[in-house]
Image (cartoon, rainbow, N blue to C red):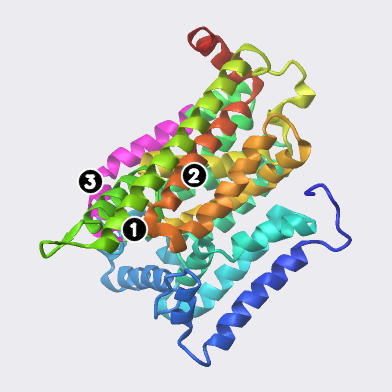
Amino acid sequence: MLKQQSKIDGRFLVIAALLGYFGLLYLANFFVPYHKFWRKLGVPAAKNTFMDLGYVLGAFDCDRLTGEVSLTNNSCFNQIAYPSSWSLLTWLGLEQRDTIFLGVLFALIFYVITLMIIGRLNYQEAIVYALILCSPPVMLLVERGNVDIVIYSWLGVGLMIIKNSRALIFRLCAYLLIFFWGVIKLFPIFGLAVIIKEKRNIFLFLLAIFTTAFITYFLASIGEMKTISQAFDVESVWFRFGHQSLFLKVKTLLLNLSLSTGGETDIKKTLRYMMYIIMSLLTLLILTRVLLSKFKNFQEWLSSDFVSTDSGKSLDKSQYIDYFRLAAGIYLGNFLVIGLVVNYKLTFLIFALPQILDWIKQENQLSLSSSMALVAIVGTFYASPFLYLWAIDEIINLLLFANLLYISLLSMPEWLKSLVHKRLSGKFSG
């Protein structure tokens, strides 16, 4: 069904869906404050439009007024949980009074970059992208005007350069752009997984340079990082994901599912507790089954077609592999290393969709895994605001993490897969 071509570019349907969504918000505002109606759609909207962007622009104002402009322990940025390196951007002259204009501008650029990245669509693909772009995490990113929307757009530009440039110098500029945002906001550094596309010696050289530079910066700023992490209590936010999120949510659930109230048994809470236990057991069974099947397939590929002998069929040559690697790198890094991040960072998974849809259409060895990843992505984009009470979104994210890691391993360059094959085939062979 995904292979069917459509006469009209499906991107027009995506645009229509977005216009319909914002048109609904506009009409609802005549009857109830739009932020209250938006919450009904799963978006925890704030009264102040583009609130996160306003905080950053206010920090620029503070920087200029105090004359602090410092790259270490800058109080103007630390108090909003941003690194002092943001002081580098004060010279742009942006002010808090520009919040609305810039918020709308950044949102428009975000949508334009996305439409350019995803390319021409058929009707079925258009439905997938419409669901994602109208989902609560993406709309939360737009509503808050968070700086991640700017990072997304710049990374999108970088990806287009990486994909379409044959000259190394242009790709190097794109890698430096990703590294720059890694210094500014940390998590984009995981997107440098995209450098794996280069030849072995160039990849190893770039890896050594970027790793050394980032570790040096991080160690120099580690004291400030601790201060920033204490300034924002992400644990109090329900719309987040990461390996820590599941444990925090289970802990909260168990506390809320206390079986007694004032010394008397609460029947409703008892039923909820039983349902939670049953759902947890079913989830563990499904997770165990999936992981065992993946491990079995991994054993088979290590002993057979893990390393492709036909360079033309190598998954490393897939059309949108660079997009996938950046998106997967950011998601895996956020989930495993940072461990607890706000859900609007799921937006970066949009970059992975062109390749995931392409693998599904090709019906190759990653078609099933890609189909599972697509279902998990759409699922987690909607489960968080509507099913978070039962931690279903966290289970989905755990499954998505395992699946994206698995796909990333299978789509590595052949030289790297050969190295992995030599190291692991003896350990995992039956």
Image depth: mark 1 or mark 2 in front: 2
Pick whichever of labels 1 and 2 is earlier in the sequence. 1
Q: Is residue 215 magenta?
A: yes
Residue where numbered disc 1 is placed: 82
Q: CA distance from mark 3 to mark 2?
A: 25 Å
At x 64%, y 25%, the residue is: 413
Q: Residue furthest bottom?
A: 30
Residue 69 lies in quadrant:
bottom left
Looking at the picture, does residue 207 appear above or below residue 302? below
Residue where numbered disc 2 is placed: 331
Find the magenta span and give its range: 208-236
Q: Position of residue 259 (x, y in %)?
A: 20, 56
Left or right position of 16 against 266: right
Residue 105 lies in quadrant:
bottom right
Left or right position of 242 against 225: right
Residue 301 in sight from this viewpoint: yes
Q: Residue furthest left?
A: 263
